Image (spheres, rainbow, N blue to C red):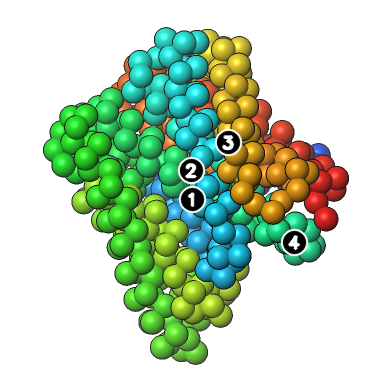
């Protein structure tokens, strides 16, 4: 199969599958993922004369494409969170960023050790890969509810948007810490190859102690360079607002954010936290430009999400999925129960009614984006459980994405004013 044929199949087939699933009132990303699985099954039929199924260099390009998709969704998230809204949301928004993620992550760690005999470090990286809520499902749904005036009274939409966005960065950072504990001094190379942009490991030297000591530096360093880049871009965009088209601004922003990810890989900083901070600063310092950029990034995301979710489907090996099926489903269900308890706990100090708090629980169920981006990292890192971890990631997308989207739609109707 030539690269041109594969590129056409991924984009055209992924788009058609997404539209079909939207017609069925299901998440488009689910259709894209399943199309990727189908394409992987059928691909050997189109192998070249030398028996090669995939074009040369394709899988080397995959980590960059995943990194690009993560950057786009985090920039969109940052551009959608204003300081005024955060102040209005208050303590619940802060608590939602880490309490549900931590409870689900550590619950899943114990469950994966028990059910699948994973080591502590392997279970931990798998758990926090799974613990991230999906911006691809949550953010568009919340923005749609906001445009319809639902959930405004107690800042529910803002709490969910802010919490879900930072929840992802928190989960990715914890994932990388556990990857560092599992791989030791080799992690910075592996994290860079995976396109994570978050490599807390080895910041203070190799081994477990160095990984743990380097975590605060990685977080604050990533946030600092993101804030600095945001201030520089805000000044530049405001100064040249009339002379630079919105598309050119978007390209400069995207290139700068991708370079920020590379800086994070070089210096072992939590660069994805910085990427979201860039969007936050732009909205604060150059609001008009920020709205232009958000609209342009929404169009880029159409392309990026097709690549991301079709590729995760292409990567799946069905025997690995069969090997973990029932036990993985049990772990996912119990992990979501722990996350739901965390959401109820985080929203306890708020003025939300019980119905509104249950809506927050539902909105925090779907998983897709981070699982698609990080599901193959353990396999690329050479961990023995890599294929099983990838299968669990795909299973999480297939089960929770439609469950969450349908729940959000029904919950908005019956639980929100």
Give the label, 1 or 3, closer to the camera: 3
**Mark closer to the chain start, 1 or 3:** 1
Q: Quadrant of the C terminus?
A: bottom right
> Residue 252 location in percent, x, y?
40, 71
Assess whether mark 2 and mark 1 are in contact (beta carbons under 8 angstroms). Answer: yes
- From this viewpoint, which residue is outermost toward the right? 414
Report the residue at 25% width, 36% height from top: 212
Asked if the residues shown at circle 4 and circle 1 are in contact, with their CB atoms under 8 angstroms apart, the answer is no
Q: Indicate the secondary structure of the residue bearing disc 2.
A: loop
Depth order, front residue of 67/124:
124
Residue at x 81% of width, y 46% of height: 415
Residues 176 and 387: in front is 176
Q: Point out which mark residue 153 bears.
A: 4
Residue 269 in the image: state x and y as whole percent: 28, 50
- Give the residue pinned by disc 2: 98
| Residue 253: percent from left, percent from top | 42, 68
Taking 207 as reference, is 193 above or below it?
A: below
- Badge 4: residue crowd in 10 Å (few <14, some 14–19, many ≥20): few
Q: Earlier in the sequence, mark 4 or mark 2?
A: 2
Residue at left offset 49%, top offset 74%: 284
Q: Name the disc covering residue 342, or none.
A: 3
The tag earlier along the polypeptide, 3 or 2, is: 2
Disc 3 and disc 2 in contact, CB within 8 angstroms: no
């Amino acid at each position: 199969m030539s690269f041109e044929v594969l590129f056409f199949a991924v984009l055209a087939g992924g788009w058609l599958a997404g539209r079909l699933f939207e017609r069925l009132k299901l998440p488009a990303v689910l259709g894209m993922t399943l199309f990727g699985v189908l394409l992987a099954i059928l691909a050997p039929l189109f192998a070249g004369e030398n028996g090669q199924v995939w074009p040369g260099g394709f899988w080397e390009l995959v980590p960059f494409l995943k990194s690009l998709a993560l950057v786009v969704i985090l920039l969109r998230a940052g551009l959608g969170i204003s300081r005024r809204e955060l102040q209005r949301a208050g303590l619940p928004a802060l608590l939602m960023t880490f309490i549900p993620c931590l409870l689900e992550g550590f619950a899943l760690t114990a469950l994966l050790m028990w059910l699948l005999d994973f080591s502590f470090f392997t279970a931990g990286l798998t758990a926090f890969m799974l613990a991230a809520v999906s911006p691809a499902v949550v953010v568009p749904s919340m923005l749609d509810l906001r445009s319809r005036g639902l959930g405004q009274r107690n800042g529910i939409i803002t709490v969910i948007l802010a919490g879900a966005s930072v929840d992802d960065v928190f989960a990715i950072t914890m994932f990388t810490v556990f990857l560092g504990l599992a791989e030791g001094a080799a992690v910075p190379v592996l994290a860079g190859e995976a396109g994570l942009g978050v490599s807390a490991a080895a910041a203070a030297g190799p081994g477990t102690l160095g990984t743990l000591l380097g975590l605060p530096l990685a977080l604050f360093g990533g946030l600092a360079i993101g804030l600095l880049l945001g201030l520089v871009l805000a000044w530049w965009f405001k100064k040249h607002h009339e002379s630079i088209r919105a598309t050119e601004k978007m390209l400069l922003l995207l290139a700068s954010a991708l370079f920020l990810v590379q800086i994070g890989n070089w210096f072992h900083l939590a660069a994805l936290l910085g990427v979201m901070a860039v969007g936050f600063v732009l909205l604060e310092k150059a609001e008009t430009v920020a709205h232009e950029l958000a609209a342009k990034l929404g169009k880029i995301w159409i392309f990026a999400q097709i690549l991301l979710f079709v590729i995760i489907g292409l990567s799946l090996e069905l025997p690995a999925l069969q090997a973990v099926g029932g036990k993985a489903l049990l772990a996912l269900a119990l992990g979501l129960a722990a996350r739901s308890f965390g959401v109820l706990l985080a929203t306890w100090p708020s003025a939300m009614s019980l119905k509104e708090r249950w809506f927050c629980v539902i909105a925090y169920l779907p998983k897709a984006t981070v699982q698609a981006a990080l599901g193959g990292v353990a396999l690329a890192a050479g961990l023995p459980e890599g294929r099983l971890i990838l299968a669990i990631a795909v299973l999480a997308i297939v089960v929770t994405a439609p469950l969450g989207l349908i729940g959000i739609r029904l919950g908005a109707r019956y639980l929100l004013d």
